[in-house]
Image (spheres, rainbow, N blue to C red):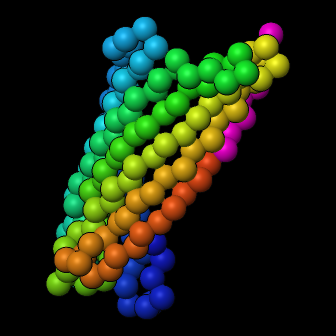
Amino acid sequence: NASPDDSTVAEKDYSLPMTVDVGASARVAGNLLLAASGRWAGWGTADDDITNRGGARDALNLSGGLEYDGFTLLGQTLPLRVGARMARLPFRWVGTDVAFPDERALTAGIGARLGRGAAMLDAAVERGSRGGDAAGFEEPFWRGSVSVTLLAR
């Protein structure tokens, strides 16, 4: 629900767009896993309502990666992961005189099993950028993540 600052404009309700997610993984060798996923979101349906603010387009995200679990250190198997993703972002940064921005990133990570498999630790670092000259801005970024998964026994 959007409530405008200007009292001459009525409130407006917006629905989230239809979103479709797909993904698959396949073991392509004994210790090599390939994964891919995609997401489409129908943000383009909001274009008419926000044309004067830059408009909207359908969003698309594609990603893929490899996991190699043949690396061992001190008797512990550590999965190594690499991946890439790209996204067509749904909204412009400013106005209608610039292109819609895109985002691209490369990721690398490692995992470990702890406590005889009772927990898993994953760490990753990502380098990417969004925008571009035609979009009116360029935003490079680094992103890091660490997660711990506890498994019930």
Count how many numbered circles sit on residues in the image.
Answer: 0
Say whether residue 130 is left or right of residue 48: right
Q: Main secondary structure of the magenta part?
A: strand
User: Residue 136's quadrant in the figure?
Assistant: bottom left
When the figure is inspected, residue 108 is found, relative to residue 94, above or below; the finding is above
Residue at left offset 68%, top offset 39%: 147
User: What residue is drawn where x is 56% and y is 22%?
Assistant: 71
Is any atom of residue 144 visible in this view?
Answer: yes
Q: Nearer the viewer, residue 123 or 78?
A: 78
Residue 79 located within the stretch drawn in magenta: no
Pick whichever, 31 or 8, lies toward us: 31
Q: Residue placed at 78% from the left, 18% from the top?
A: 118
The answer to which quarter of the image holds residue 122 is top right
Q: Is residue 8 above or below residue 70?
A: below
Residue 65 left/right relative to 81: left
Q: Quadrant of the C terminus?
A: top right
Q: Position of residue 130 (x, y in %)?
A: 35, 66
Residue furthest to the front in view is: 74
User: Magenta stretch?
Assistant: 146-153
Asked whether 97 or 80 is in front, the reply is 80
The location of residue 30, given as percent across then percent down, is 43, 8
Percent of width and height locating residue 24:
35, 22
Q: Position of residue 111 (x, y in %)?
A: 62, 31
Q: Residue 33, relative to residue 63: is it above or below? A: above
* Residue 46 in sight from this viewpoint: no
